[in-house]
Amino acid sequence: MAGESRFQASLIREIKRKYPGAVIIKPDSGYLQGIPDRLILYQDKWIAFECKATKASGHRINQDYYIDLLNDMSYASFVYPENKERFLYELQQTFRPNRSSRISVRI
């Protein structure tokens, strides 16, 4: 668990540096067993993630269910050192601003 805690703290510092103003909260797993470790609120979007020490780390009861459910709503993922860069890329894609489509008008 110590490895997971260090990894999570380092990841949160990096997210705060990349996304100033982001609000990162820890949902109450005692209230909802299996809910992901962290929720990031940024501008008008959100993501949830569950940190693991390694890819091989076990999942607790209901964790897979909530990751899948929340991923269908916005974005949610397990994150561990082996997929950290992919996670940060997907975070960037989720948080990128919506751009209005460009319409060509012929006169």
Image (cartoon, rainbow, N blue to C red):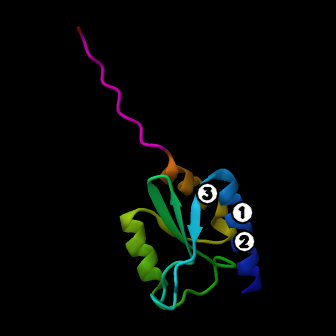
Residue 25, horizontal then vertical, whole percent = 57, 71
The stretch drawn in magenta includes residue 69: no
Residue 75 sits in which quadrant? bottom left
* Residue occupying the point 49% across, 64% down: 47
Image location (x, y in percent) of residue 100: 37, 34
Does 91 appear above or below 11?
above
| Image position of 70 with respect to 29: above or below | above
Q: What stretch is highlighted in magenta?
A: 97-106
Residue 94 numbered mark, or none: none
Q: What residue would you read off at disc 1? A: 13
Q: Give coordinates of residue 41: x percent, y percent.
A: 51, 61
The alpha-carbon separation of the residues under discs 1 and 3 comes to 12 Å
Q: Residue at x 70, y 69 (%)?
A: 81
Is the C-beta separation of discs 3 and 2 under 8 Å? Answer: no
Instruction: Assign the C terminus to one quadrant of the image.
Output: top left
Circle 1 crowding by C-alpha within 10 Å: few under 14, some 14–19, many from 20: few
Element on which disc 1 rests: helix
Q: What's under tag 3, amino acid-wise? A: Leu
Asked whether, in this view, residue 6 is left or right of residue 39, the answer is: right
Q: Which residue is drawn at 30% across and 24% down?
A: 103
Report the magenta stretch's main SS: loop
**Residue 82 located left or right of residue 24:** right
Q: Is mark 2 on a helix, strand or loop?
A: helix
Residue denoted by label 2: 9
Real-space Cα distance between discs 3 and 2? 15 Å
Label 2 Cα neighbours within 10 Å, binned few <14 / some 14-19 / many ≥20: few
**Sequence-first tag of 3 and 2:** 2
